């Protein structure tokens, strides 16, 4: 059973960088053909795909967030990390990590991040 768990600060100040880590258990992030995504849901809005890192280490980003987003991984810890720079209150959301191949089959429980001074 694959499990994903997000971790990171729940409160970030405007203009700072948001950093979240997803720790994966029950499966390796280097297993062929799986992609590991970050997805967020602002209050009252739908899910927004932010980007992903592939089993190979290749990264993919939403065009609307690409200039501010970086996804990396630590294979020794079986973790992948999201960094979102220059945050504003509009980046307030529940942030999820998820595994994807043909569909999103495993999700973390989500973590609330609020951007406020």
Image (cartoon, rainbow, N blue to C red):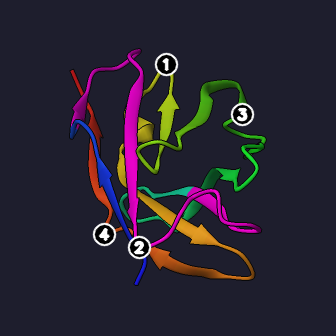
* Spatial separation of the CA atoms under disc 4 and disc 2: 16 Å
The tag on residue 105 is none
The tag on residue 26 is 2
Report the side of 65 relative to 48 (left or right): right
**Sequence-earlier tag: 4 or 2:** 2
* Spatial separation of the CA atoms under disc 2 and disc 1: 34 Å
Identify whether 1 is placed above or below 46: below
* Spatial separation of the CA atoms under disc 3 and disc 4: 24 Å
Local crowd size for mark 4, using a 10 Å CA cut-off: few (<14), some (14–19), many (≥20)? some
Mark 4: which secondary structure? loop
**Sequence-earlier tag: 4 or 1:** 1
In the rendered structure, does residue 19 fall within the stretch colored magenta?
Answer: yes
Give the position of the C terminus as an image quadrant. top left
Q: Residue 14 occupies which quadrant of the picture?
A: top left
Give the position of the N terminus as an image quadrant. bottom left
In the image, what residue occupies the spot 51% across and 22% down? 85
Residues in magenta?
A: 11-37
What residue does disc 1 label? 86
Q: Which dot, 3 or 2, sits closer to the camera?
A: 2
What residue does disc 4 label? 109
**Sequence-earlier tag: 3 or 4:** 3
* Spatial separation of the CA atoms under disc 3 and disc 2: 30 Å
């Amino acid at each position: 059973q694959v499990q994903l768990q997000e971790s990171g600060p729940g409160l970030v100040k405007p203009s700072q960088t948001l950093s979240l880590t997803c720790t994966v258990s029950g499966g390796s992030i280097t297993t062929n053909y799986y992609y590991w995504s970050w997805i967020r849901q602002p209050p009252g809005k739908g899910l927004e795909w932010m980007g992903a890192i592939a089993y190979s280490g290749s990264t993919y980003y939403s065009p609307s967030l690409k200039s501010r987003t970086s996804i990396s991984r630590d294979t020794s810890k079986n973790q992948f990390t999201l960094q979102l720079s220059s945050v504003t209150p509009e980046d307030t959301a529940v942030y999820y990590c998820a595994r994807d191949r043909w569909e999103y089959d495993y999700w973390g429980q989500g973590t609330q991040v609020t951007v406020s001074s």
